[in-house]
Amino acid sequence: MKHCLLLIAAALAVACSTRPVPGVCCRGPEDCSQLGLSEDRPCPAGQACVEFQCVVPSCSTQGCAAEAPVCDVAIDVCTGCTDASDCSRFPGTDVCDPQTGSCVECLVAADCTTAEPVCDGGSCRGCRLDTECPSGACGEDGACVPEANIVYLHPNGIDAGLCSRDVPCRRIQFGATKTSASRNHIVLAAGTYDLNGETEHLTSQSTSAQQLFIHGGGARLRTAGEVSTVRTEIDTVIRDLEIISGNEAIDITGTSRSILERIQIRGGLRAMDVRGAVVMRDVSIEDCAYAILLSGGARLTLERGIIKNTNTAIQGDSFATVDVSNLLVFGATDVAIDLANAAGGTVSFTTIADSGADAGSGPRAFRCPPSGLTVRSSIIWAPGTVARPAIDAGCTLASTIVGPTAVPGAPNVDPRFVDAVGRDYHLAAGSPARDAVDAGPAMDFEGDPRPRGARFDLGADEAP
C-alpha cells in the first residue's frame, strides 16, 4: 500500500493540478490528504475508488450476499439493506432486518408459514411449546393447532355446549366427550381446577379420537380422597400440568400408551400407577409415598426428571421394563429404585443420593432384577450409619460410581457434590464424575447441553 501511494504521488507531482491523472482517485479530505491533494478526485460513472485507483466494482459483477445485500459501487463494498426491495432477489430470505442490515426469513410470526409458525432469530421454525401458538396448542408436526380443532377449558367454565374458546367448559372428562378424530386437542386455561374428590376418567367411550392431546398451560388439578386425579385407558399426551393429589395422581391402564411432558406431581400415596406404556420427559415428583409403580407389563421411558422426598422413586413387578436417563433421585426413605422383580432394562446418567433406611438388610438405594439390568454412567451414593452397599449384585455396572460402601466393578470415590447437606447434587469442581465418558445424551436432567467439557459427566448433572 505504501509503495502504491508513492507511485501515485509521483504521478501527481508531474501532472498539472487542474488535470486529474487517469485512474487515480480519492474521496474526502482525509483520504485525499494522503496524496497531497486538497480536493476529491472522483472516478468516472460506473467505477469505484479502491485504494486510490478507479476500478470496475467487484460487488456489482460478483454480487453481494444476503448478510450485506447492497452494492455501494462508489467504494466497491457490500452494505446492509434498508427495506424489503433490497432483499427481493433472495428467495426465502426476502425480509430486511433494519437492525443488522441482513436479509432474513422473518422478523415477526406473520412472515412465517403455518408449517413453521415461529420466528426465532430471523428464521422460521416449527413450534416447540404451546405458548408459542395463539391457539394455545402446538401440534406434533410443529404447526400450531387451529382453534377449530381444540376443546377449551377454564376453571370457571360450564360443562355444557361445545367447549369453544369463547364459552369454555371445566372438566377434562366432559371436554373429552366433545372431541373427535379431527378435534382431539384439549387446552386448559391457567388456574386451579378443583375436582372435589372426582376423577378425570378417559376411556374409549369418551371420544372417537385415537389419541387425545391435553395442553395444561401451567394449570393445576387438585383433588382429595381415595381416588385417582387422572385415569386414562386411551393413548394420551399430557403437557405442562401440575397435579396435587390426595391419593393417586395419574393412573395409566391397559394397553394405553401415554406421553407426559413437563408434569409436576405433589402429594398423595402414589404419583403414577402404570399398567401400560408411558414416556415421561422433564417431570418433577415429590412428597408422595411411591412415585412410579409399574405393573402388568408396564414399560417406562423416562428422560430428564427429579423425584424427591418419597419412600420409593420407582418400583416394578416381574413384567415391567425401564429405560431411564437423566434422573435425579434424593430423599427416598427406603430403596430409591426397587426393580428386584422387574424384567430388566437400562438406567443411565442417573444420580441417586441421600436415600435408603439404616434399618433392614440388602442394598440401601437400588435393588436389581434377577434377569439383569444395566446401570451406566451413573452415581449411586447412599451414605448411612450402617455400612451397606448402595446397589446389589444383580445389575451390570458400567462407568458408574457407587458408595460409600464399595461394591465389585464400580469405583468407590466421593462424587463431590456441590452441597450434599444442602441437597445440591450438581457436580463440584474437581469431581471425579466430570469428563468421565465419551458418549451420552444431548442434555442433562435440567436441559443443559451435554457435553460441556471435553467429555460427558456421570450422573444426572452436566457441570459447566
Image (cartoon, grey):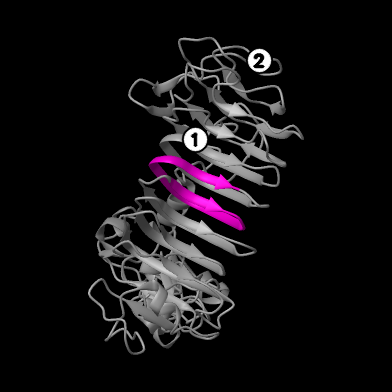
| Disc sitting over residue 118 in the figure | none
Please give the range of residues in magenta. 270-294
Q: Is residue 278 magenta?
A: yes
For label 2, the SS is loop
Q: Residue at (49%, 35%) from the top-left corner?
A: 312
Crowding at dot 1, Cα within 10 Å, few <14 / some 14-19 / many 20+, comes out as many
Q: Nearer the viewer, residue 437 or 250?
A: 250
Quarter-wise, where is residue 390 in the image? top right
Residue 192 as seen in the image, left or right of residue 347: left
Q: Kindly identify which residue carries mark 1.
A: 312
Quarter the C terminus occupies: top left
Let me know if residue 44 appears in the view.
Answer: no
Magenta: predominant secondary structure element? Answer: strand
Q: Nearer the viewer, residue 18 or 105?
A: 105
Q: Nearer the viewer, residue 85 or 365?
A: 365
Quarter-wise, where is residue 129 in the image? bottom left
Q: Quick one: label 1 or label 2, which is nearer the N terminus? A: 1
Q: Residue at (52%, 39%) from the top-left corner?
A: 327
Crowding at dot 2, Cα within 10 Å, few <14 / some 14-19 / many 20+, comes out as some
Q: Kindly identify which residue carries mark 2.
A: 407
Q: Where residue 163 sits: x, y (%)?
A: 34, 84
Residue 233 as seen in the image, left or right of residue 1: right
Let me know if residue 148 appears in the view.
Answer: yes
Q: Residue at (41%, 44%) from the top-left corner?
A: 269
Residue 428 as seen in the image, left or right of residue 362: left
